[in-house]
Amino acid sequence: DQVPSDTAQLRFNEIAPASDESFWLEIANQRQQPAELTGFVLTASVSGGAYTFPAQTLGAGGMVVVTEAELGFDVAVFRQGLPIAESL
C-alpha cells in the first residue's frame, strides 16, 4: 500500500512507558505544511482496538497527543510487553 503524502512525514514523537498508568502517545508532523489526520487509524494488533482520528488538521511542525481514554481501547496488554502496530 502506498502511504498518502499527508502522512509521509508523521512520526511517533513520544510514547509513554507501558508501565505508566496514564498512557499516551504523541504524533509529530515533520512537514513544512499542514497534514490532514481526518480518518487515519491507529490500531492495536493484539487487542484488535482501533482509534480513528476525527476531523483534524495537524499544523506544520505541530504535535498531537492521544490519550488512552481517547484511544478507546485498553492498553494494559502492552504493559505486558506485547507489540503494538500502527497504520500511520
Image: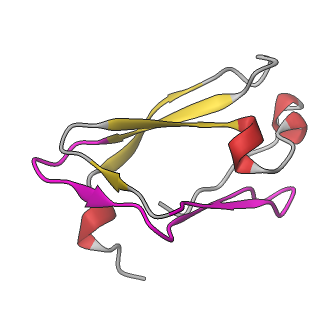
Q: Residue at x 72, y 27 (%)?
A: 23
Query: In this image, 32 relative to 18: left or right?
Result: left
Of the 4 image quadrants, the one containing the N terminus is: bottom left
Residues drawn in magenta? 29-54
Image height of 53 relative to 30, above or below: below
Looking at the magenta stretch, what is its main secondary structure? loop
* Residue 8 visible in the current orientation: no
* Residue lying farthest to the front in this orientation: 55
Locate residue 57, reporting x and y percent: 33, 56
Image height of 80 relative to 5, above or below: above
Number of numbered labels in the structure image: 0
**Is residue 31 magenta-colored?**
yes
* Residue 60 visible in the current orientation: yes
Q: Residue at x 85, y 29 (%)?
A: 79
Front position in the image: 8 or 36? 36
Locate residue 15, reporting x and y percent: 57, 28
Q: Residue at x 57, y 34 (%)?
A: 25
Q: Quadrant of residue 47?
A: bottom right
Query: In this image, 12 relative to 23: left or right?
Result: left
Query: In this image, 4 relative to 17: left or right?
Result: left
Locate residue 81, reporting x and y percent: 82, 33
* Residue lying farthest to the left in this orientation: 32
Model colouring: secondary structure
